[in-house]
Image (cartoon, helix red, strand yellow):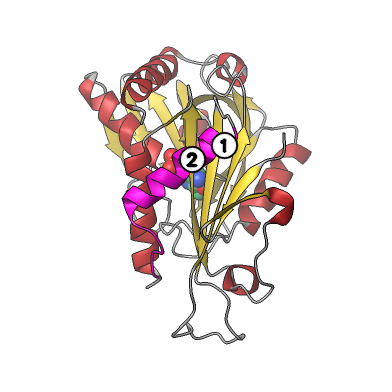
Amino acid sequence: MTRIVYVNGDYLPETEAKVSIFDRGFLFADGVYEVTSILGGKLIDFAGHAKRLQRSLDELAMANPVTEDELLAIHRELVRLNEIDEGLIYLQITRGAADRDFAYPKDATPTIVLFTQSKPGLAENPLARTGMKVISIEDQRWGRRDIKTVQLLYPSMGKMMAKAAGADDAWMVEDGHVTEGTSNNAYIVKGNTIVTRHLGNEILHGITRAAVLRFAREAQMVVEERPFSVAEAKAADEAFITSASAFVMPVVEMDGQPIGAGKPGNVTARLREIYLDEMRKAAV
Ligand code: PMP
């Protein structure tokens, strides 16, 4: 089946979809994006992603070419056309095509593209049973990581460094403290306390993070939002990551050293279960 994608108002086979070479997303990484997961043919936490999208656009003074209702309708139509039961849907918005100039163009029309990825077994990922291995790498990204921009070169480099080291991902470190994973938020657990970096310009404000911390507090777990060091991570009882595509995923090793028992821990397993249960109920 040919994948159908959405480009500036049209639903087209992926081979027919086109974007200008003068698109500022291509020339300047002048674009933002979102990724929403799909379970049982429904969107997980769409409202959270739509809200962060608007925030990213506002931070860059970029126009939103669609309303939230239109965006939801486009997402649903693409899920329907591609018959996605479990998978991901990507949304990319750029400032559009304009003659090359660093200054924002006055009259460019934003480019909007959406595409799906079918991922059967997304919620039954075997890594959730065995846990992930991460390495630590220096965080060399720019200073406004809170905006969900398309500047993903350093995260890509980090994933490649992790692969080369036989790990599943990398946790980025600044001034001795973990900021986040290459495409996810990072957490450690010590006793009944969950520690994760506080919100600020240094990390992306994960939509999954917000939901998981809410569920953790509701389940009487203690949450500390503060920087944690690499040494603290290595001495933790458990560690995990969150993202829209991995949900809550255990981390069992860092830089070749086991974390806790070197197996997925109970707090992580419980949070994964609560997250998936609650989010499936609220999916749209
Ligand atoms: N941090 C970074 C750097 C990311 O790229 C992502 C995922 N896109 C996240 C955190 C997790 O965000 P979310 O839970 O909204 O997927």
Q: Position of residue 246 (x, y in %)?
A: 53, 30
Name the outermost residue toward the right. 164
Q: Are marks 1 and 2 in contact (CB under 8 Å)?
A: yes
Is 76 part of what is drawn in magenta? Answer: yes
Residue at 58% over, 17% down = 262
| 70 shown above or below 273 | below
**Residue 122 figure quarter:** top right
Q: Mark 1 — residue?
A: 81
Q: Position of residue 51 (x, y in %)?
A: 32, 50
Residue neighbourhood size for the residue with mark 1, other residues' Cα within 10 Å, grouped as few (<14), some (14–19), many (≥20): few
* Circle on res. 219: none
Residue at 39% over, 69% down = 63
Is 270 part of what is drawn in magenta? Answer: no
Can residue 155 be seen in the rendering of this structure?
A: yes
Q: Which residues are magenta?
A: 63-82
Q: Identify which residue, 118 or 177, lies in the foreground.
A: 118
Please tell me whether the stretch drawn in magenta is mainly helix, strand or loop. helix
Q: Mark 2 — residue?
A: 77
